Structures are given as structure tokens and as C-alpha cells.
Image (spheres, helix red, strand yellow):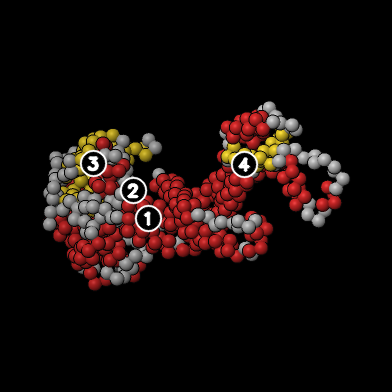
């Protein structure tokens, strides 16, 4: 589903990603972990075509993103949902309107918008607050709405960049539980986080990054023996 | 999935206009003023052109004949005159008829003609000129050609009035074109600024739409329609104001300015072109801002 081969990215000559190579199968749940500045967010942005890699090849759902023209990027994004740390909800629109916007963007017939938006909100338990605006919701609730927006077009891939970074532990657990449910239904999930505790508990594949490199991948043989058995996330079995 | 049609863009543009109501109202007002000047220029130009055309219809060249021409010579001359391009009609006026006419024109002051003795006026041909040949250069060339014909003593026409009208029409045409171009640029500038403000005020929404898979046309369409609507409505308002002012001019003033023929308001095709042109300028202004913003 996602293949990266020797992908590098530089910002003013300073490497943010160095020769990243890994694949994600359909239906997999992958955590990308690492300290701040490890390159997690850059990696997700490159997968989402918000940034272009300087070197290497990226193939997502059979499409080589290097050969993808600017006008084709929206169509690639329609197959991917993205959850942000800061939710990126429109504060002046209601919860329902925020979800409806994602449906309108892809040209959903007007008659289907309400039903589909409410179904998505129900999945995250927010259907009873569809008339409220985001500032009236808690952080956890806002993130659930953001997840509903990411899922409303039934993407095959869900990317999340530090989705629990602004949430209290309980709300964070709730968000991860939702991701788990979504993954169970067949959606490929890729989450960038430094919430080691949750990552350990979830018992999923972990790709650990440091200084722009993958240092361990729990699915692959240990890339950096120095990290093995140190309690680093890469040591968690798949 | 298929995209939405023009109704969607119109509805979105309407919400956009409402969201930035004050900015759009100010833009619309400024465009109304700018297009009012364009409308006024067009009104003056079109009325002047029709006045010149009407005068062209009335323009005549007087060809004065030498004394003592035979009937055969006169017949030959009139044939030559009628063969000249631009000459619609040639009417003979004898010296007696000319004196009678002068006497009529001097009504009340006929005493001036007493003591003239023999009629000093010559026979003449009054030529009516086609409006297409009534500009100064053509009239001048025609009169010079006629002067050289056998039996012609002198040629006269309202050279000055033709030249003045010609200059005036040319001035209004070129001046109007320059003015329209300047005001057109102004409209583009106004619209691009109001659309830019709308884009900045909805920057977060636009960024989000890009993240969730919106195409460029989905994002830009409503802003472009907004620009078109503001400019088209502004133009329509200017035409409304112009029509109001036009009909408010007192009848006496119209007669003074334009004679008994009166002034005509802009024809419907000019109104349609102005509104369409305004919308196009709005589209152009929108494109300028939208492209810059998305880049």
C-alpha cells in the first residue's frame, strides 16, 4: 500500500530525512515514533504530498508521488485521511458543517451529505453535538470530530501526526481506541507519536526514527543493534 | 464522484459576499463610481457620433458656377458631379432662386439688398454628401476635385464645422478609450484587493480544503464568481444611477445640448456589453489574487 525507497529530504541543506526505506501493507497499523526533530512529521507530510522528497521513490496505492502533478495531488489525498495535532477544525462552522465540508470537497451529492456526516459523527460518538462549534468542545471531542472528518470519505489510509499531543491521557486513550477500531475495519493506519506508553500498550508495528533515519522497525530485522533491548520502542514485538 | 455545477459556486459566492459584506460593499461602490464615468463617456460618445452622423446627412457642398455656361455645359457638369464618390444628390439653384432665398433669410432687413442692381449671386449646384464621406479629410479632397471641373467658379462647404466635429469625435473616442482602459485597470485592482482580503480572511479554510483533497477549481471557483458578481453588480448599479441622472436632465437642457432630436440613452446592447465587460474585469481581478495567493 505504501512503499518508500531511500527517501531523503533536506531543508536548506540540512537533512530532515535520510534514505528512509520501508513499506506498509494494506490494513496494517504502524506507529512512527521518535523524539522531536526525528523526522516523523516530515515523513507524514511527504506521504501526504504536503512536502516533496528530494531523493528516493514513494509509491502510494500504486501511484509514484514523484511523477504526480500538482493537479493530481487532491485526488491522492482523497484516499487518505489526515488527523492533525491541532485538529484543524474551522472554529466558525458547526461540527456538522466541518464534516460536511470534507464531503463537499469531493463532490458528494447534496442529498447524501447529511446522512454520511451523521454516520461519521456517530462512529466517533459525536453525533449528539453536531450543532456545536469546535470552541465549545473539549480537546478530546475536537479530535474525535477531526477523526470523523478524516474518515467520512472512507479513505484507505489514515495518517495522524501527534494526534494526542494536545490531549489529556484519558482523551488520548480514547483517540487510540478509535484508531484501533478504524484499523480493525480494514483502514491502514500510520500514527506519528512520541507517546511511548500507549505505543507499548497497543502492541503494533513500530518504526522508530532518530535524526531523520529509521533506527528500528519492529517488523524488520533490527537496523541499529545498539537500540535493541534498550527499552526503545523498536524493541516491542509486532 | 462528480463535482458541483454553477449553482454551487453561486451559492458559495453568495455566502462569501455576505461574510465580507463591508469590504464587498465598498468595492461595489467604488466600481459603481468608476463604471459611472465609463457609462457617461459612452453616453457622450454615442450621442455625439449620432449627432455627427445626422450632421453628415445634412452636410452640403455648394458648387458655384461661372456665368454664361450653356445648358449643355451645365448638364455635363452635373453628370460629373453625380459621378463623384460620396455625392448623393445634386440640386440646381439658379441665381434668381438664390437671391430669393437670401431675401427670405434677411427677412425684415431686405433693405440691405436694395441698390444691388443686377443680381450678383451665381448659379449653383447644392450637393448632398453621404455621411461616410463627411469627415474633414474626405470633404476637403472632394471639394478640391470639384474645383478643378470645367465651369466651376468656386466651392464652399462648412469646412470649420466639419473639422470641429471631426476633432471632437476623435477626442471623445480616444479620450474615452484611454479613460475606459484606466478605469478597467482600476476595476481589476479593486476586485483583486477585495478578493485578496476574502482569501486572507478564509486562509485557514483554504489550507484545510487543500489538505482534505479539494481541487484548485473547487477552492478558487467561489472567489472568482465573487469577483465577477461584485463587478457586474457594481456596473449594473452605475447604469441605474446613469439612467436616473439621464432622465433627471430637464427637457430644455436636452434641447439646448442636442437640438430637437434630443439625447438617447445607452442602447440595450451597450448595457449588456458593459455588464458583461464588468464581470470579465471582475474575473480578471479575482484571477490575479487567487493565483498569487495559491502560489
Cα–Cα span, label 1 and label 3: 44 Å
- Is residue B178 shown to the viewer in this render? no
Which residue in the protein does label 2 denote? Answer: B216
Give how far apart the Cα atoms at labels 4 and 2 are: 63 Å
Relative to B287, B242 lies left or right: right
Comparing B47 with B128, the one in front is: B128
Q: Secondary structure at mark 4?
A: strand
Residue at the disc numbered 4: B128
Kind of element beneath mark 1:
helix
Single out the residue that lies furthest toward the right: B115
State the CA–CA distance, disc 4 to disc 3.
96 Å
Does residue A104 appear left or right of residue B192 in this picture?
Answer: left
Sort mark 4 into few (<14), some (14-19) or many (20+) by Cα contacts within 10 Å.
many
Give the spatial CA distance, label 2 vs label 1.
Answer: 11 Å
Residue corresponding to mark 3: A214
**Which mark is first along the chain, 2 or 4?**
4
Q: Nearer the viewer, mark 2 or mark 1?
A: 1
Viewer-proximal residue among A24 and A230: A24
| Among the two numbered marks 1 and 4 on one chain, the one whose residue lies closer to the N terminus | 4
Amino acid at each position: 500500500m505504501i512503499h518508500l525507497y531511500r527517501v531523503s529530504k533536506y531543508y536548506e541543506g540540512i537533512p530532515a530525512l535520510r534514505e528512509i526505506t520501508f513499506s506498509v501493507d494494506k490494513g496494517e497499523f504502524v506507529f512512527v515514533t521518535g523524539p522531536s526533530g526525528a523526522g516523523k512529521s516530515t515523513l507524514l507530510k511527504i506521504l501526504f504530498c504536503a512536502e516533496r522528497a528530494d531523493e528516493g521513490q514513494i509509491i502510494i496505492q500504486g501511484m509514484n508521488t514523484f511523477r504526480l502533478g500538482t493537479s493530481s495531488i487532491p485526488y491522492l489525498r482523497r484516499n487518505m485521511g489526515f488527523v492533525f495535532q491541532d485538529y484543524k477544525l474551522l472554529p466558525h462552522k458547526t461540527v456538522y458543517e466541518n464534516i460536511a465540508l470534507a464531503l463537499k470537497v469531493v463532490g458528494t451529492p447534496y442529498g447524501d451529505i447529511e446522512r454520511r456526516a451523521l454516520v461519521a459523527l456517530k462512529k466517533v460518538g459525536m453525533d449528539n453535538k453536531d450543532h456545536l462549534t469546535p470552541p465549545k468542545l473539549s480537546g478530546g471531542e475536537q479530535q474525535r470530530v477531526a477523526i470523523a472528518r478524516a474518515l467520512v470519505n472512507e479513505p484507505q489510509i489514515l495518517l495522524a501526526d501527534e494526534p494526542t499531543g494536545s490531549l489529556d491521557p484519558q482523551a488520548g486513550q480514547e483517540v487510540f481506541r478509535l484508531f484501533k477500531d478504524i484499523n480493525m475495519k480494514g483502514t491502514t493506519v500510520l500514527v506519528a507519536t512520541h507517546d511511548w506508553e500507549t505505543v507499548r500498550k497497543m502492541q503494533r508495528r513500530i518504526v522508530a526514527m532518530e535524526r531523520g533515519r529509521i533506527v528500528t522497525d519492529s517488523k524488520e530485522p533490527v537496523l541499529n543493534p545498539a537500540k535493541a533491548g534498550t527499552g526503545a520502542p523498536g524493541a516491542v514485538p509486532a | 464522484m462528480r463535482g458541483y455545477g454553477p449553482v454551487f459556486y453561486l451559492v458559495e459566492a453568495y455566502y462569501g459576499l455576505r461574510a465580507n459584506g463591508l469590504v464587498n460593499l465598498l468595492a461595489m461602490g467604488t466600481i459603481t463610481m468608476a463604471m459611472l464615468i465609463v457609462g457617461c463617456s459612452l453616453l457622450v460618445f454615442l450621442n455625439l457620433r449620432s449627432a455627427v452622423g445626422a450632421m453628415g446627412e445634412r452636410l452640403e457642398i455648394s458648387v458655384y458656377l461661372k456665368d454664361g455656361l450653356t445648358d449643355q455645359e451645365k448638364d455635363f457638369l452635373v453628370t460629373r458631379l453625380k459621378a463623384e464618390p460620396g455625392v448623393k444628390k445634386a440640386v440646381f439653384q439658379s441665381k434668381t432662386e438664390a437671391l430669393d432665398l437670401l431675401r427670405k433669410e434677411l427677412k425684415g432687413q431686405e433693405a440691405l439688398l436694395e441698390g444691388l442692381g443686377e443680381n450678383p449671386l451665381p448659379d449653383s449646384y447644392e450637393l448632398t454628401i453621404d455621411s461616410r464621406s463627411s469627415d474633414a479629410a474626405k470633404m476637403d479632397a472632394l471639394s478640391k476635385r470639384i474645383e478643378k471641373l470645367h465651369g466651376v467658379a468656386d466651392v464652399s462647404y462648412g469646412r470649420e464645422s466639419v473639422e470641429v466635429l471631426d476633432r471632437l469625435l476623435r477626442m471623445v473616442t480616444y479620450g474615452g478609450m484611454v479613460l475606459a482602459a484606466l478605469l478597467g485597470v482600476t476595476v481589476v485592482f479593486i476586485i483583486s484587493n477585495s478578493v485578496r482580503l476574502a482569501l486572507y480572511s478564509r486562509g485557514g479554510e483554504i489550507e484545510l480544503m487543500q489538505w482534505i483533497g479539494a481541487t484548485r477549481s473547487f477552492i478558487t471557483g467561489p472567489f472568482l464568481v465573487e469577483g465577477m458578481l461584485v463587478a457586474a453588480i457594481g456596473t449594473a448599479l452605475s447604469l441605474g444611477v446613469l439612467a436616473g441622472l439621464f432622465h433627471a436632465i430637464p427637457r430644455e437642457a436636452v434641447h439646448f445640448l442636442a437640438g430637437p432630436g434630443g439625447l438617447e440613452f445607452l442602447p440595450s446592447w451597450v448595457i449588456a456589453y458593459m455588464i458583461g465587460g464588468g464581470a470579465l474585469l471582475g474575473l480578471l481581478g479575482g484571477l490575479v489574487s487567487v493565483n498569487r495567493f495559491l502560489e
